Image: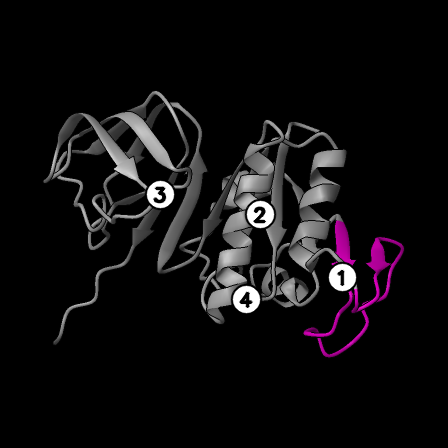
Amino acid sequence: MNGRCVIFAAGEKVSRNCADMDFIGRAYVIAADGGTELAADLGVMPDRIIGDFDSCGHMPDGNNVEVYPCEKDDTDLMLAIKAGLKAGCRDFQIYGAAGGRLDHMIGNIQSLAFLLGRGAHGCIISDREYVTLLSPGRYFFTKRGGFSLSLFAYSEKAEGLCIRGVKYAAEDCELSSDFPLGISNIITADRAEVSFKKGRILVICSRLFTDP
């Protein structure tokens, strides 16, 4: 086990171009419920399959399948996250957890907070979004054409924030949870640098849509 975990969930499908196949090939792979279909689409064989399979349409077979009741406290994604943590993983990539219902998306972002609170890091990756949650530190985000970079306070305040290599740079500023100051920035350099000293920051890189 190298500390890497990939989880396939039952949300919006992702293309092979979007998936980090090198990371996936060296990770502990868990399919959550209908995420088995996404894994199959990408030609990936899960090490473990977990869920109540209410969105799968059928019950998978195999010794690596764990079936849970539909009425439970954990979502299928959370079951997979807990399994990854128990296996010793600390670096998570989650596919199929974007798009669809807004309440599910908010719950999936909360799952990133669950990881962060346990000394792990997770990101949600789709063709249209990259979502991650950060604790204080210094981070870099590579420029992707046609994508925005938005930062939100995921605590009451995020303090000592510096943003470089972007259209709207800032030094030692503050984000609050009740005002969207950090939305819709654009990376102008090869990569953006984001650092902050206190709080938590939610990062969302979204594909920009323009009229034809």
Side of 62 where 211 appears, left or right: left
What's the residue at 70%, 64% (across, down)? 33
Q: SS for tag 1? A: strand
For badge 3, the amino acid type reads Val
Q: Which residues are magenta?
A: 48-71
Of the residues under marks 3 and 1, which one precedes in the sequence?
A: 1
For badge 2, the amino acid type reads Ser
User: Measured from the top left, where is residue 156 in percent x and y?
Assistant: 39, 37
How many C-alpha atoms fall within 10 Å of the one at disc 3: few (<14), some, or many (≥20)? many
For badge 1, the amino acid type reads Gly
Magenta stretch prevailing secondary structure: loop
User: Measured from the top left, where is residue 134 in percent x and y?
Assistant: 43, 33
Residue under label 4? 11
Of the residues under marks 3 and 2, which one precedes in the sequence?
A: 2
Q: Residue 34 in magenta?
A: no
Q: CA distance from mark 2 to mark 1?
A: 16 Å
Residue under label 3? 203
Residue 111's label in the rendered image is 2
What's the residue at 76%, 61% (across, down)? 51
Q: SS for tag 2? A: helix
Q: CA distance from mark 3 to mark 2?
A: 14 Å
Viewer-side label of 3, 1: 3
User: Measured from the top left, where is residue 53 in percent x and y?
Assistant: 75, 70
Q: Is residue 71 above or below residue 202?
A: below
Residue under label 1? 51
Side of 82 where 99 appears, left or right: left
Q: Residue 61 in magenta?
A: yes
How many C-alpha atoms fall within 10 Å of the one at disc 2: few (<14), some, or many (≥20)? many
How many C-alpha atoms fall within 10 Å of the one at disc 1: few (<14), some, or many (≥20)? many
How many C-alpha atoms fall within 10 Å of the one at disc 4: few (<14), some, or many (≥20)? many
